[in-house]
Image (cartoon, grey):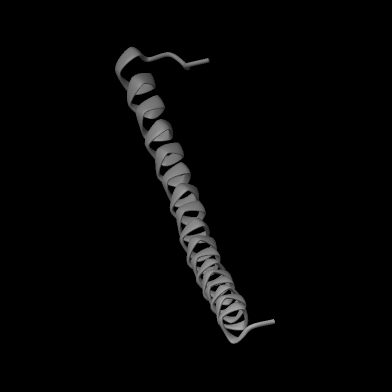
């Protein structure tokens, strides 16, 4: 093979390695962000449940009967 062919092959390999490393880093960042989103959704669920309970209590206090 000619030196030019080896240069083309080497350049291709270097580009593939760079893309693979970039993808690995991007996946790690996305995994971290996804975990944070899941945690925030859990916190929002807890806050919404608390508000629902407060609204049920208020409704019961106003109407004088249990909400089913």
Front one among 35 and 51: 35
Q: Is residue 43 above or below residue 45?
A: below
Q: Is residue 45 above or below residue 34?
A: above
Q: How many callouts does the rendering have?
A: 0
x and y percentages locating residue 27 in the rendered image = 55, 64
Q: In the image, is 67 to the left or to the right of 16? A: left
* Outermost right residue: 1
x and y percentages locating residue 26 in the rendered image = 49, 66
At 46% from the left and 54% from the top, the residue drawn is 37
Q: Is residue 61 above or below residue 28?
A: above
Q: Quadrant of the N terminus?
A: bottom right
At 43% from the left and 53% from the top, the residue drawn is 40
Q: In the image, is 7 to the left or to the right of 44? A: right
* Outermost left residue: 62
x and y percentages locating residue 50 in the rendered image = 42, 41
Front one among 60 and 49: 49
At 37% from the left and 15% from the top, the residue drawn is 64
Q: In the image, is 27 to the left or to the right of 40? A: right
């Amino acid at each position: 093979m000619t030196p030019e062919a080896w240069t083309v092959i080497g350049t291709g390999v270097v580009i593939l390695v760079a893309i693979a490393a970039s993808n690995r880093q991007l996946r790690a960042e996305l995994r971290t962000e996804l975990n944070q989103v899941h945690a925030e959704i859990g916190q929002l669920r807890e806050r919404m449940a608390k508000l629902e309970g407060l609204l049920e209590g208020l409704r019961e206090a106003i109407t004088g009967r249990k909400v089913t």
